[in-house]
Amino acid sequence: MNKSILVVSVLGACCSVAHAQSSVTLFGLIDEGLNYTSNVGGKSLWSMSSGDVQGSRWGLKGSEDLGGGLSAVFKLENGFNINSGKLAQDGQEFGRQAWVGVSSTKFGTLTLGRQYDSLVDYLGPLTANGNWGGGMFTHPYDNDNTDDTFRLNNSVKFASVNYSGLTFGGAYAFSNSTGFATNRAESLGAQYVNGPLTVGAAFLNVDEPNNGSAGAVANLGSSGTDGSWTAARQRVFGAGINYAIGAATLGFVYTNANLSQPTGTEYANFAASPSLGAASSIKFNNFEVNALYQFTPALYVGGMYTYTQATYDGTSGGSAKAKYHQLGLMADYNISKRTDLYAQAVYVKVASDSGIQGTGLEFAANPDAAAPSSNDRQVIARIAIRHKF
């Protein structure tokens, strides 16, 4: 009898240890609010909008201890629209993230699946839109993907451990087609943290984004895109810095996005310039300054200003420019550890050369708006509640 009890006790202890070495966590977030947009096709609009600062989502993540400092890891993350109940990311079940891999405490983590690129991982957190402000503070058309408008399918990704404040990584996304270079992507990035200072830099190249349904950035859903540009190539690089001074954090970020033979993005389809012809390239230079002040542990106020210069090079020769000025403010108050209320507003103004007229680039177009403005300016305001679980 005593031996039987001993055996059962030992087996139970072994099962407890095995269970403790693996875990699966359910997580999620719901972001819902009321938006006002001053100009949508020439008229003002009041609308309910889901996931503006952070996309509404739920997911599963887990790990299993393999011994020797190794763990098997995975993450499945679904995005959805709380107003309609529909799937986000063009109707994909796990459109935000879906990956599995191996993590080492000595070297880093290697994962495979649908994942974020290095701009999102290492540079986005230094911007207002990629950190505390969300989509309303995105650079025009999210031309640099710092607001993670699209992810990389078929990707192999490495993220290092922390080496005295330095982290780095990269990703390669396969085309999954016989045309090896068709719709493939490469990305690299690094970040260094030392006390109040954080600096980061990243690079992304996508060849023929949205060419076919199997590639790194695929044609999906009725919009015809996964958020990216439709072009012969999308190439982005940038760097940024954040510095904390007491309760304040100040930041500056520069990014450059170069689109070869672009025809449009999820937010807008661009026509050919009447005087310059179709676009051989569109280049965006984004300069952002941002600041955040933590008044109390529950309350912060943030602001940002972005100046963006877009250069349109036409196939018939010549070029024209559009200059975007974007100013945003936000206040956020936590009413509990998991629930907060926030208000934010953004003003966009565009000044453009005559050669831009007729292309669509002359209109104010905030990615968070229901649609581009019918003129050169647009105001968006939002009050919302966010709950995390």
Image (cartoon, rainbow, N blue to C red):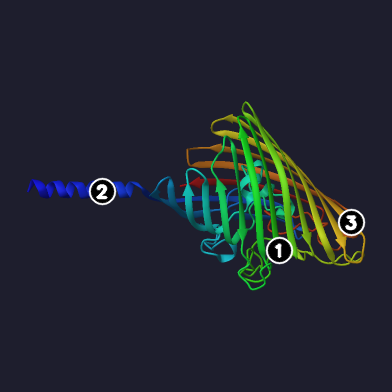
Q: Which residue is mark 3?
A: 320
Which numbered marker is on residue 14? 2
Q: Which of the marked residues, 2 or 3, is nearer the chain's N terminus? A: 2
Report helix, strand or loop for mark 1. Answer: strand
Which residue occupies the extreme bottom position in the image?
178
- Expressed as whole percent of the image width and height from the top left, the position of residue 333 reads 56, 37
Q: Quadrant of residue 86?
A: bottom right
- Expressed as whole percent of the image width and height from the top left, the position of residue 63 reads 42, 51
Q: Pick the residue in front: 117 or 324.
A: 117
**Marks 2 and 1: CB-CB under 8 Å?**
no
Which residue occupies the extreme left position in the image?
1
Residue at 69% x, 47% y is 137
Q: Which of the marked residues, 3 or 1, is nearer the chain's N terminus? A: 1
From mark 2 to mark 3, how far is it between C-alphas? Answer: 70 Å
Q: Is residue 172 left or right of residue 7?
A: right
- Expressed as whole percent of the image width and height from the top left, the position of residue 29 reads 51, 50
Residue type at mark 2 is Cys
Q: Nearer the viewer, mark 3 or mark 1?
A: 1
